[in-house]
Image (spheres, rainbow, N blue to C red):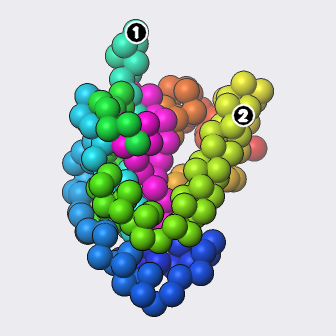
Amino acid sequence: MKDQLIQSISKYVDLSSEEEKLIDFFWTEKTLEKGEYLLRNGEICRTDNFVANGALKAYYINPQSGREEILYFAIENWWATDIESFQKQKASIYNIQAIERTELLQINYNSFQKMLFKIPKLERFFRIILENYLGSLQKRLITNNTLDAEQRYFTFVENYAKIADKVPQYVIASYLGITAEFLSRIRKKHKSS
């Protein structure tokens, strides 16, 4: 699993063999079973998490409707962390839960800071990861504000085919801000046309 993380980092930053060994030292492996929580609302996010295998969903419970609302998904080679909770070491406002058996690499906050001190070029890697994340958030906001539900669904499937294959439809519906029944109608309409 650690080779997978190093390969991900190496797409953006050249690492020496000594730096690869240092990275290996800081990260630990964790497995979550389907339905198990990585983080719960009210807890402090103690680790940054690289998904080696599996799938997670981050969500909060809408206080008005009582419904689960999906914030993001994380699959292989993606990250799953409450960034604000991790950076400020304060309580999270959402949950992160395994959709299927998931293998993670984790680093705690203090180790993360030490790793960045010892390998300063990793600052660049994590900046790029954050920029990519912010770009995807911007696209999601624009998509949600400009496209109807059907267009949002097909844009999601086009951009995130791997997630669409892994994640139950009712969870995708939550992510898109529609009901599972409405998503079912969209899919049925598309199949018949």
Mark sitting on residue 74: none
Mark sitting on residue 64: 1
Q: Residue furthest top?
A: 64
Q: Residue at x 40, y 42 (%)?
A: 87
Query: Residue 79 in magenta?
Result: yes
Where residue 125 appears, as percent x and y from the top left, is 57, 64
Q: Which residue is mark 2?
A: 143
Residue 114 lies in what quarter of the image? bottom left
Query: With 38 as the anchor, is 172 left or right in this view?
Result: right
Q: Looking at the image, which is closer to me, 101 or 80? A: 80
Quadrant of image for the N terminus: bottom left
Where residue 15 appears, as percent x and y from the top left, is 53, 82
Q: Residue furthest front?
A: 117
Query: With 19 as the anchor, is 34 left or right in this view?
Result: left
Dot 2 lies on which element? helix
Where residue 151 appears, as percent x and y from the top left, is 73, 36
Report crowding for label 2: few under 14, some 14 to 19, many 20 or more residues within 10 A (C-alpha): some
Query: Residue 62 in magenta?
Result: no
Instruction: Give above or below for 110 relative to 153.
Output: below
Q: Which residues are magenta?
A: 68-86
Instruction: Give above or below for 163 relative to 43.
Output: below
Q: Residue at x 32, y 52 (%)?
A: 109
Residue 40 lies in what quarter of the image? top left
Dot 1 lies on which element? loop
Q: Using the rendered image of the protein, determine whether residue 169 is visible from the camera's viewpoint.
A: no
Q: Using the rendered image of the protein, determine whether residue 72 is visible from the camera's viewpoint.
A: yes
Report crowding for label 1: few under 14, some 14 to 19, many 20 or more residues within 10 A (C-alpha): few
